Image (cartoon, grey):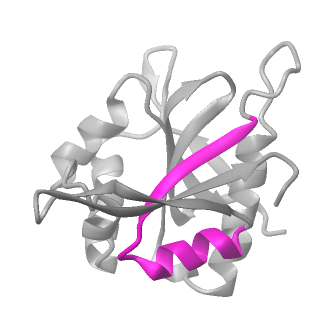
Amino acid sequence: MTDIRLVPYCEIDGIRTYSDSEIAALYDRMEMDKTAKDVFYDGSVKNRAEFVAMAKKPGTYLYVVIEKGNPDAQFGIVWLNRVEFKRAWFHFCFFSNVWGARGVEIGKAVISQLTNMKNNAGDFVIDSLLGVVPKANPKAINFVKRCGGILLCDLIYGSWNGNKNANETGTLFQYLRNEQ
């Protein structure tokens, strides 16, 4: 398994783990890789300022995926939201420097780390990660499957297309702890 580290974007003793400009640069990377419109298919984030605001939104848990021991080697980002009852909605974007087989290896490691996190009492925090990928994005659906995701069903009107201002079919997927 790839030696990766998930660095949370959070505040520790009043100081954020990343500056606003560093978080905005992650959006710039998505723009450079031409993935921003796919990642934010719903149109909820259209620029770097909106991305920083989304990352800071209460209930959003963003992680920067880096190579352990080399914080400059950024592989992508993942974030969770709507966390309740040991399940969370999972969102991801891996950068072009790891697309292909290496990205799948990193993706599997990310899922394993997220689903095996424990709280201070030693209990697992997350049992299940859920997500919806637009049916119109077969590359993302294939990536989910290659990383061990379970494709649950297609949801009619399950994915919002911000450009068309309309619902489209989305594929609901799930990752379970110890299922990768």
**Would you identify the image quadrant in which residue 30 lies?**
bottom left
Q: Nearer the viewer, residue 166 or 4?
A: 166
Give the magenta range.
127-147
Q: Residue furthest bottom?
A: 100
Q: Please tell me whether residue 99 belongs to the stretch shown in magenta.
A: no
User: Height in image: 152 above or below 49?
Assistant: below
Count of labels in the image:
0
Quadrant where the image shows the C terminus = bottom right
Residue 144 spot, x, y in % from top left: 61, 68
**Would you identify the image quadrant in which residue 169 lies?**
bottom left
Instruction: Please say whether residue 68 is visible from this viewpoint.
Output: no
Residue occupying image coordinates x 88% and y 20%: 122
Q: Is residue 32 left or right of residue 142?
A: left
Instruction: Please say whether residue 14 is visible from this viewpoint.
Output: yes
Residue occupying image coordinates x 74% and y 66%: 148
Q: Nearer the viewer, residue 44 or 24?
A: 44
Residue 120 spot, x, y in % from top left: 81, 15
Residue 53 spot, x, y in % from top left: 25, 36
Q: Is residue 65 left or right of residue 51?
A: right
Residue occupying image coordinates x 31% and y 69%: 38
User: Height in image: 177 above or below 56?
Assistant: below
Quadrant where the image shows the N terminus = bottom right
Residue 55 spot, x, y in % from top left: 36, 38
Q: Please tell me whether residue 128 belongs to the stretch shown in magenta.
A: yes
Q: Is residue 102 left or right of residue 116?
A: left
**Would you identify the image quadrant in which residue 127 lies?**
top right
Q: Residue furthest front?
A: 156
